[in-house]
Image: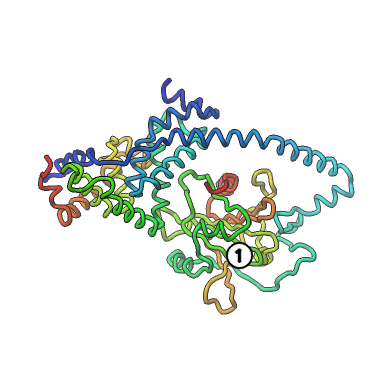
Amino acid sequence: MSDMELENRLHSIASRMEYPRTPDIAGSVTTHLQRSTQRRLISKPLAWSLTIVFVLLSSLMLIPPARAAIIEFIQVGVVQIFRGQPTLTPIPGTPVSTISVTATPIPDSDLLPILNKIAGKTTLASAQKAVQYSILLPAYPPELGEPDLVYVQDAEGIMTILVWLDPQQPDKILLSLHFIPEGSWAINKMNPEIIQETSVNERKAVWAVGPYPLKLYGSSGGLEFTRLIDGHVLIWADGDITFRLETDQSLEEAIKIAESLEPMP
Amino acid sequence: MDETALIHRAATGDALAWEPLVQAHQEAVFRLSYLLLGDPDDAEDVAQETFLRAWKYLKRFDSTRPLRPWLLSIASNLASNRRRSAGRYVAALMRAFRNEPAHANIEEKSTQQNDASELWQAVQNLSISDQQIVYLRYFLDLSVAETAETLQVAEGTVKSRLNRAIEKLRNIIKSDFPVLLEGREV
C-alpha cells in the first residue's frame, strides 16, 4: 500500500471514530466567567479600603521620622534588604544560621535523579491538604498547566515546591516555585546577591541569584543546598507567604508568570 | 456576527460574545482532548480550562489569525501536561477500557467503528508529538496549514513529521493491527 493510499485509508477510518457526546462546555464556561465578574464587583469595597490605607501611609511618608523609618529598608516577606547594600540582611532579632552554603548548578544529565532524591514528593491535591495557605498556579504562559512535580517540606513552616519540566526536553526543568510560610528557617538559609529591585503586583520584589534550600534524602548533614535551574530567582511576598520563582527566563517573563498566579480550580 | 467581531467584543470582557465562539469550537477541542487523554471527564476539564485560559489571554491574540488552531494548541499543551502524570493516564485508559462494554458492546459495534477504535489504539503507541499530528490531521481533519498553525511550525515541518509518523504507524499496524490494512471495511 503506497503512502497516499495509506493516508486516504487513515482519513477514512478516523472519520468514523466514535466520540463521547460533547458536554455543554460553553454553558459551564459562561457561568464560570459570570461568577468571576460578580466576585470582582464584590471586591471593589476592599479595593477602596486598601486605597485609604495607602493614602494614610503616603501621608506618614511626609513626616520626617516616619519617612526615615520606612525608607531605611525594603522588606520582601520576612527578608529585609537594606538600601545601598548588595546582599540580603537577616531581620534583627531573628536567629541567624552560620551555615555557609554555596549554590552549585547541576549538570543537566543529573537533574532527574536529583529530583527523585528531594524529600517530600507528593501530589498537588495532597500538598494543598497539607498546608494552611492556598497553593497558587501560574495562568501564564497559558500552556504551562499543572506542575510535573510537587514537594512539601517541613522547614518550621510547611514549604511547598512546584516544579515544571520542559515539555520539549523532559530532562530539563523549566520553572520552579517555592511557597515559604512566615517563620520558616528556609529564609535564613538564603543569602542571594541582589541583581535588581522590582515589583510583583505592585509589591516590592527582588531579582536575585543565590542558593536554593532543598532537603534531600540521604545527605550526610541532613541538608544539602542546590539550585534546580542555572538562572535567576524572583522573590516577593504576599501576606504571610514568601514566593521564590526560579527560571532561566527574563525578568519580564518572570514577573508575568508571578503576576498570573491564581488559586487552583 | 463574524468570528473576528465576536473576538473583539469578547476581548473587551463581553462574556456573552465568548459563548458562541466556545460553542463553535468546543467539539473540536473536546475531541482532541479526549483522543489525547482517553477519558471523557478529563477531556471535559481540559476543554473547559482551554476556553478559560483563552478568554484570559484573548487581548494578546492576533484576531487576523484563525481561532481554532490557537484553541487546539492550548488544549494540546494542557492535555499533554496532564497525561505526563503517567499513572493518571494509565488509570484513565483502564477506566475507558472497563467502561467500554457499558457504552457499547464491541460485538454490536459496526465494523467501521471497530476499525476506528483499533486505529486509535495503534496511534497510542506513537510518541505524544506524533500522536498530536496524527490526531489533528486525520481524526480532526485539519488541513496541513491549520495543523502547522496549531503546532506553531512550518507547513513543510508538518509534512515531514507526518511522513515519519505514518511510517511508524504503518509498522505498528502491520505487526499488531493487520486487519486495518487488509480492507475489511472498504
Quarter of the C terminus of chain B within the rendering? top left
Horizontal relation, residue A260 to residue A1: left or right: right
Q: Nearer the viewer, residue B175 or B162?
A: B175
Residue farthest to the top, as pictured: B1
Report the chain holding disc 1. A
Q: Which residue is disc 1 drawn over?
A: A211
Position above or below: A109 against B75: below
State the SS at label 1. Answer: loop
Crowding at dot 1, Cα within 10 Å, few <14 / some 14-19 / many 20+, comes out as many
Horizontal relation, residue A20 to residue A233: left or right: left
At label 1, which amino acid type do we have? Answer: Pro
Residue A70 point in image, percent of width and height: 81, 50
Q: Residue at x 74, y 62 (%)?
A: A89
Residue farthest to the front, as pictured: B102
Q: Residue at x 44, y 33 (%)?
A: A26
Quarter of the N terminus of chain B within the rendering? top left
Q: Nearer the viewer, residue A253 or B168?
A: B168
Q: Nearer the viewer, residue B136 or A4?
A: B136
Q: Residue at x 77, y 41 (%)?
A: A54
Residue A35 point in image, percent of width and height: 56, 35
The mark tally for this picture is 1
Residue B82 point in image, percent of width and height: 42, 51
Horizontal relation, residue A237 to residue B74: left or right: right
Residue B123 point in image, percent of width and height: 25, 50
Q: How is the image coloured?
A: rainbow
